[in-house]
Image (tube, rainbow, N blue to C red):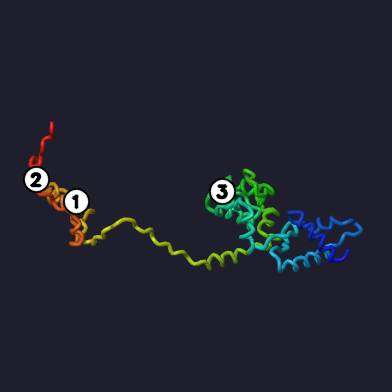
Amino acid sequence: MEVSELKRVVEGALLASGRPLSLRELGNLFDVKGKPDNELLRQALAELADECDERAYELKEVASGFRFQVKSKYGVWVSRLWEEKPPRYSRALLETLALVAYKQPITRGEIEDVRGVAVSTNIIRSLLERGWVRVVGHRDVPGKPAMYATTREFLDYFNLKGLSQLPSLADIKEIATAEPELELDEAPVTGRSIELPVEDLPAINDEQSVEAEVSNAASDPDQAATTSLEVPDSEQADTVPEPEDVDPDANFKPLPN
């Protein structure tokens, strides 16, 4: 079979499968006599990848094999075909997944030692149900805790061919340090406030001073009822004047019978 015809067979199989196909699976599409070798298959796949340069999709090799997928820059529009929004994962779940990816095999207790907090059972269950993590054995210590490692589905989801394509910890640290620190301002105080000079405040920490203030207020009620704040003239215009003395019976009229 010519390479041009082989490309069309491989292209059709990848479009119809709906999942990544390995070289072995692609080779099994042909009869034993006409089965192409892996080198010829890779040549066909390479030419298919080159033909995708001017298209909205690309040929990507991941852990499980080869697949066609929409290029990431067009994902914003294509994702609107589905009403269901992609799931959002908590920071705790992603931190747990990262520790499994970089430190595998790792136990739940070891994850908790690194993070400094307990790992929720729901997080482990979510990772297992998602197929990103699996149990690969049990640590030979008291309790025989399960050891977790990542799966091919994890690599496929993040477009990785292998764990070697994970960014190094040094690169992650450089990215983190390159981020500018957020300058968080204090929360603004709502409502109106009046600031008093410190020297005008009573010495409330002095027990004797407090007792003196209370004593003065009790002996002079008029003084206790006044405020220590002076209102500017501009604000005094809005104050309500004191009512004059009025005879309560002056305007009294009896009701008609």
Q: Mark 2 and mark 1 in contact (Cβ < 8 Å)?
A: no
Residue type at tag 1: Val
| Residue 223 x, y percent position in the rendering | 13, 51
Of discs 1 and 2, which sits in the foreground?
Answer: 2
- Dot placed on the residue nearer the N-terminal end, 1 or 3: 3
Frontmost residue, 250 versus 148: 250
Residue 129 shown left or right of residue 209 in the figure: right
Identify the secondary structure beneath mark 1. helix
| Residue 81 x, y percent position in the rendering | 64, 55
Dot 3 alpha-carbon crowd within 10 angstroms: few under 14, some 14 to 19, many 20 or more: some
Q: Residue at x 87, y 66 (%)?
A: 2
Residues at marks 2 and 3, CA–CA distance in whole angstroms:
76 Å
Q: Which mark, residue 119?
A: 3
- Dot placed on the residue nearer the N-terminal end, 2 or 3: 3
Q: Quadrant of residue 249?
A: top left
Residue matched to label 1: 210
